[in-house]
Amino acid sequence: MQLTVELKKLQGKKLFTLYQKKPFEIMQISNNQIIIKTSTESQRPILLKEITLAWNHLEKHKELTRGEIRDLGYSEFNPAYVVAILASLPGVSHTLSPIILKLKKQWEIVK
């Protein structure tokens, strides 16, 4: 399974941030960014690199917190959206307090 293929399956889907349950929709996925539509903005770009860096960490360590996404520099401005997108991928589970993503061992995605 490839990360980009899994992300493209999310195009057109409505997702929610994990903590505040704010809705957003993945409008478009290109080679370098994901365009989302939030309830307050018409469009918001998220660099694909932000998702990929966070995914690589999750894949290596099997856990990733929302705080780590920001603190480790994976996504300074979009950690709530990055964590929600990753949480919607196959094999990823999460807790809410604190927000922690967990990857099941059999779900490793080929980049």
Image (cartoon, rainbow, N blue to C red):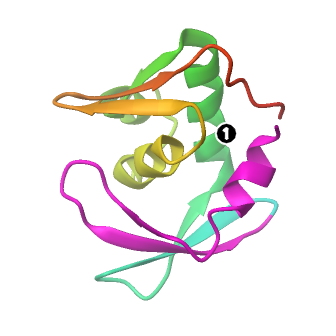
- Which quarter of the picture shows residue 52? top right
> Picture coordinates of residue 45 (x, y %)?
56, 69
Q: Which residue is drawn at 18% across and 57% down?
A: 20
Does 41 sit above or below residue 18? below
Q: What residue does disc 1 label?
A: 52
Does the magenta portion include 10?
yes
Q: Residue at x 64, y 70 (%)?
A: 11
Q: Quadrant of the C terminus?
A: top right
Does 30 sit above or below residue 37? above
Amino acid, disc 1:
Thr
> Picture coordinates of residue 98 (x, y %)?
20, 27
Compared across the picture, whether 77 is left or right of 59 comes to left
The magenta segment is: 1-30
Does 38 sit above or below residue 89? below
Does the magenta portion include 35?
no
> Picture coordinates of residue 108 (x, y %)?
72, 23
Between 7 and 37, which is closer to the camera in this rendering?
7
Q: Residue at x 78, y 50 (%)?
A: 4
Q: Quadrant of the N terminus?
A: top right
The answer, for residue 2, to whether it is visible in the render is: yes
